[in-house]
């Protein structure tokens, strides 16, 4: 049994991938599912849609690979983080739609917690800031707004979990209620230093302890799928949140290694080893993975707009028909112009965390056209990454000594122009791997590690293959001039702060 099935349950689709023992891909299946927007700033998923699409893609991937349950050594799960499900312990029926990580409905709860002065204590224990992004306030909202839910929860009738936990419960026929340390670390309820649910936090957010799952290593025997799902039981042996799974898939096992995933937004994680580094620059301190009871930590920065800025060029302005056109178009831009786009379409993420500001273009002239706008759009992603990079190096000076190489994945990394500009502005190498499916690979690795299909991390890291290394080629004077221009543009946007 040298095959591993990875479940990659994302925000807009569920995907299953079958990996061979040499980490090559045997089969892929994917299915989108509906998004629900019941009010401004609210985003929901039907848990049943998450479940049925997951089962369907697993069955399809196995069929495409020509495999049966007995051929699969283990299942690994990676998931959209922070999305919250509350369900009936006896029936498995969700009491409310899943509240998605993007949902902002608990902003008032977060504002109250901040006003009451709880943020320093919460940050010290969880490594997080108080924000509707995280799961804890979402659970509290469901318990307070679904009739009878709080009473049922206090009687021990309801369970809470992130998507990995909910899928595990369903896959095992309700026998296992567990999660891994990476997902637990995103709830506002988990102490990342003790590795346990925190009584003070649980009481503050009024979440009954009986609802909470057991927290395990990221690579561990979680349980077995019921025989009826895939024609026989399969061990479930790995779980990690999507950005942590991508960090593992990129083999960032050494302190100082960093990965950045470019999708709709961008998530950068820097491995800080066994030391949780408290950020002074509004980055998050999170658990990168937990193996053999040993927690490895990371600093994380989130950029809200990366690939979606290219979508804006295509759908909003009609400048391009396909994303692939942006690099060649940017290449034709007038080198005498210095146009900056600050893509704060939904506010600014790390290290600024200002949801109120909106985007702006700086440096426009009569000669500014599509090429300059494409140039500014792609460059904006690089500048935002630089801001995270600089914040990480300030928070953790060891990163300067580590000669950090940035490993990249996600749709935007297909643009050679963007990756070269990223290397130029960071003044550091940018490595694009052969296998771009790093999130699913990370989940497969965790499951395969427990099942004996894959070796320990240092040996697994030997399998990482470079597709292309982008080396910095920009002069120091040009780099400094461009970064100073970006800093002025950001300052202008932050100064605008006109509110919603």
Image (cartoon, rainbow, N blue to C red):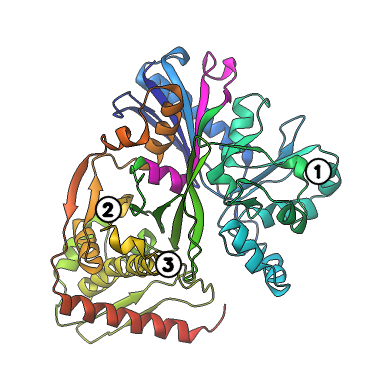
Q: Earlier in the sequence, mark 2 or mark 3?
A: 3
Residue 491, image x and y in percent?
Answer: 40, 84
Residue at x 73% of width, y 72% of height? 116
Q: Is residue 133 above or below residue 157?
A: below
Q: Earlier in the sequence, mark 3 or mark 1?
A: 1
- Magenta segment boundaries in residue numbering: 222-248
Query: Which residue is more in the foreground, 102 or 409?
Result: 409
Q: Is residue 224 magenta?
A: yes
Gap in angstroms between the C-alphas marked 2 and 1? 45 Å
Circle 3 is placed at which residue position? Answer: 395
- Mark 1 packing: few (<14 Cα in 10 Å), some, or many (20+)? many
Residue 410, image x and y in percent?
Answer: 33, 50
Circle 2 is placed at which residue position? Answer: 413
Circle 1 is placed at which residue position? Answer: 153
Q: Is residue 217 magenta?
A: no
What kind of element bears circle 3? helix
Left or right: where does residue 481 sit relative to residue 389? left
Depth-wise, is mark 3 or mark 1 nearer the camera? Answer: 3
Depth-wise, is mark 2 or mark 3 nearer the camera? Answer: 3
What kind of element bears circle 1? helix
Depth-wise, is mark 2 or mark 1 nearer the camera? Answer: 1
- Mark 2 packing: few (<14 Cα in 10 Å), some, or many (20+)? many
Residue 299 sits in quarter: bottom left
């Amino acid at each position: 049994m040298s095959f591993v099935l990875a479940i990659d349950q994302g925000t807009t689709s569920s995907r299953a991938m079958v990996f061979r023992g040499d980490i090559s891909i045997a089969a892929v299946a994917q299915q989108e599912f509906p998004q629900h927007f019941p009010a401004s700033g609210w985003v929901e998923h039907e848990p049943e849609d998450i479940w049925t699409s997951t089962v369907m893609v697993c069955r399809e991937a196995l069929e495409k690979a020509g495999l049966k349950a007995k051929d699969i050594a283990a299942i690994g799960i990676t998931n959209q983080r922070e999305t919250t499900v509350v369900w009936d312990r006896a029936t498995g029926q969700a009491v409310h739609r899943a509240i998605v990580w993007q949902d902002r409905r608990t902003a008032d709860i977060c504002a109250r917690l901040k006003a009451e002065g709880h943020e320093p204590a919460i940050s010290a224990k969880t490594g997080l800031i108080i924000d509707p992004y995280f799961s804890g306030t979402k659970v509290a909202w469901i318990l307070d707004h679904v009739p009878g839910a709080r009473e049922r929860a206090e009687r021990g009738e309801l369970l809470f979990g992130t998507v990995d936990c909910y899928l595990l419960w369903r896959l095992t026929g309700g026998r296992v209620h567990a999660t891994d340390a990476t997902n637990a670390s995103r709830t506002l309820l988990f102490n990342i230093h003790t590795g346990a649910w925190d009584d003070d936090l649980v009481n503050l957010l009024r979440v009954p302890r009986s609802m909470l799952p057991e927290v395990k290593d990221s690579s561990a025997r979680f349980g077995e799928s019921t025989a009826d799902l895939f024609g026989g039981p399969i061990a479930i042996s790995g779980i990690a949140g999507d950005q942590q799974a991508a960090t593992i898939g990129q083999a960032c096992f050494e302190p100082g290694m960093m990965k950045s995933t470019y999708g709709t937004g961008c998530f950068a994680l820097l491995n800080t080893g066994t030391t949780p580094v408290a950020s002074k620059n509004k980055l998050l301190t999170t658990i990168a993975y937990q193996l053999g009871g040993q927690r490895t930590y990371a600093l994380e920065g989130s950029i809200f707009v990366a690939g979606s800025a290219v979508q804006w060029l295509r759908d909003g302005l009609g400048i391009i028909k396909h994303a692939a056109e942006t690099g060649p178009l940017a290449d034709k831009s007038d080198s005498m112009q210095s146009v900056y786009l600050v893509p704060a379409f939904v506010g600014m993420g790390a290290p600024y965390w200002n949801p109120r500001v909106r985007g702006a273009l700086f440096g426009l002239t009569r000669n500014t056209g599509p090429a300059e706008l494409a140039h500014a759009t792609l460059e904006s992603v690089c500048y935002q990454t630089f801001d995270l990079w600089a914040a990480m190096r300030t928070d953790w000076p060891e990163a300067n000594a580590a000669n950090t190489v940035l490993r990249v994945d996600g749709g935007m990394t297909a643009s050679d122009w963007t990756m070269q500009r990223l290397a130029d502005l960071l003044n550091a190498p940018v490595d694009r791997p052969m296998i771009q499916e790093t999130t699913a690979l990370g989940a497969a690795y965790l499951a395969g590690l427990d099942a004996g299909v894959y070796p320990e991390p240092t040996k697994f890291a030997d399998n990482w293959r470079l597709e292309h290394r982008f080396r910095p080629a920009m002069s120091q004077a040009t780099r400094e001039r461009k970064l100073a221009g970006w800093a002025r543009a950001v300052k202008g946007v932050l100064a605008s702060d006109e509110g919603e």
